[in-house]
Image: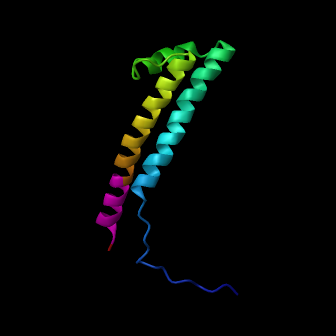
Amino acid sequence: MAQKTKKNSSCNCSLNIPALAISLAITLGVFLFSIAMLSSFLGKGGVIIQTLSSFYPGYSTTFFGSLIGAFWGVITGLIFGSILGYFYNYLLQKNSY
């Protein structure tokens, strides 16, 4: 027979904001670099790169443009990861009893 476990209300479920920001930065940087390189090698997806280049100046399907896109991805990931982690922790503290 399975035992019932008590709900632990003192759970430390907050996010580590720097870890979230860095992991999101690396993921977005690698993603932007990868899609630019794949677009360059396969010759498809140029519309996506053009659309993203309106948000990230210098982003293109060249190797140097891919590095610029990776840089912008890291910056964007750091900013949004920090905001997301802070907002999550704020709501977690506000809703805790």
Q: Main secondary structure of the magenta part?
A: helix
How many labels, in total? 0
Q: How is the image coloured?
A: rainbow
Q: Please state, as top left, top right, bottom left or bottom right, where the C terminus lies in the image.
A: bottom left
Left or right: 37 as drawn, with respect to 74: right
Relative to 94, residue 3 above or below: below
Q: Please state, as top left, top right, bottom left or bottom right, where the N terminus lies in the image.
A: bottom right
The part of the image, by quadrant, that contains residue 93 is bottom left
Please tell me which residue lies in front, 89 or 41. 41
Relative to 60, residue 10 above or below: below
Q: Is residue 89 magenta?
A: yes
Q: Is residue 93 magenta?
A: yes
Residue 51 image offset from top left, x and y in percent: 46, 17
Q: Residue furthest left?
A: 94
Write the residue at 56% across / 13% down.
46
Q: Which portion, as a residue range, is magenta?
A: 86-96
Write the residue at 48% across / 14% down.
50
Write the residue at 38% across / 53% down.
85
Residue 7 image offset from top left, x and y in percent: 48, 79
Residue 62 image offset from top left, x and y in percent: 56, 15
Residue 65 image offset from top left, x and y in percent: 50, 19
Write the residue at 41% across / 46% down.
81
Relative to 47, residue 89 above or below: below
Relative to 20, residue 8 above or below: below
